[in-house]
Image (cartoon, grey):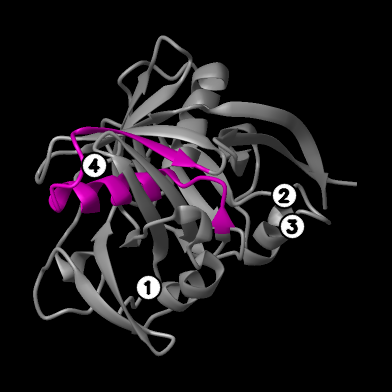
Amino acid sequence: MSGIRFTKMHGAGNDFVILDRLAGAPFPDAALSRRLADRHFGVGCDQIMVIEPAVAAGHAFRYRIVNADGSAAGQCGNGARCVAAYLRQHHGLAEGALLDSPGGSVAVHFLADGEVELALGVPRLAPAEIPFLAEQQSLRYELEVLDRQVSIGALSMGNPHAVLQVSDVASAPVSELGPAIEQHPRFPDRANVGFVQIVDRRQVRLRVWERGVGETLACGSGACAAVVALRLAEAVDEHVAVDLPGGRLRVRWSGPGTPVYLSGPATTVFEGEFCL
């Protein structure tokens, strides 16, 4: 019986199946991706990270991202950190290397504490670049969702994000509003939806409903989007600890026109072979 070699990893509980095409793994179609991601009949994961040879000049490797439902994703901060850790162990990825992703170039830094930091690029704020349907760029947008008005920030970290500020993230209606905003017609490509509570100017709490996945224990690009939206509103400082159900990530952002830096753990759980 043929099989596919894989590595299971997670970043703060946001978990991934790593497929290494340099080692002969195939690119998973939508059906295989759903089988791999199934938590009862497969390996179980939020996303599948596929490692490939670099195509763009100056980049060490390329990665692509497939959501648990088989759809393609534009960026995944936690997954990218896991890819970087995997590549360092198996392919000697160098400090400061560039990875090519669907959302653009990602610079990798390995920290002394074993964590991985990424420069995830400059946030895209113009509605057409998110994409989000709006006549002009604004800090906040009003959406009609489930017969109510909600106020959101909207931006892209290589993938579209909506950010809602809440008073208590533990009681936020994530499973109710999350899918409704994800599929709102003003987000033509759907959206990741973050519910963020400010603790103080250097700490926030966050839950994220991920596009094509559902609520996850952590979301790296969502943590970046939340900090960007709050910093644009002058509600947080440059360095922010983001506490998610699966653990803490750290985000730093100097402001418009500069890249967002994301750091946190990248942990290998196990390796195996998935039988076809």
Residue 38 has which mark? Answer: 3
- Is 5 placed above or below 29 here? above
- The amino acid type, in three-letter code, at marker 3 is Asp
CA distance separating discs 2 and 3: 5 Å
Query: Are circles 4 and 3 on residues that touch, CB within 8 Å?
Result: no
Q: Position of residue 91 (x, y in %)?
A: 52, 20
Foreground pick, 233 / 70: 233
- Is 136 placed above or below 104 here? below
Query: Which residue is tagged 1?
Result: 189
CA distance separating discs 1 and 4: 20 Å
- Callout 4: few (<14), some (14-19), or many (20+) C-alpha neighbours within 10 Å? some
Pointer 2 or 3: first along the chain: 3
- The amino acid type, in three-letter code, at marker 1 is Asp
CA distance separating discs 4 and 2: 29 Å
Q: Is residue 149 left or right of residue 123?
A: right
CA distance separating discs 1 and 3: 23 Å
CA distance separating discs 2 and 1: 25 Å
**Residue at disc 3, secondary structure:** loop
Foreground pick, 10 / 21: 10
Query: Which residue is tagged 4?
Result: 121
Rendered residue at 44%/28% (across/down): 264
Q: Which residues are magenta?
A: 215-244
CA distance separating discs 4 and 3: 31 Å
Pointer 1 or 4: first along the chain: 4
Q: Position of residue 257 (x, y in %)?
A: 9, 44
Rendered residue at 59%/64% (across/down): 70
Q: Quadrant of residue 152?
A: bottom left
- Callout 1: few (<14), some (14-19), or many (20+) C-alpha neighbours within 10 Å? some
Query: Which residue is tagged 2?
Result: 44
Question: In this view of the protein, can residue 227 be seen by the observer?
Answer: yes
Q: Is residue 26 left or right of residue 2?
A: left
Query: Are circles 2 and 1 on residues that touch, CB within 8 Å?
Result: no
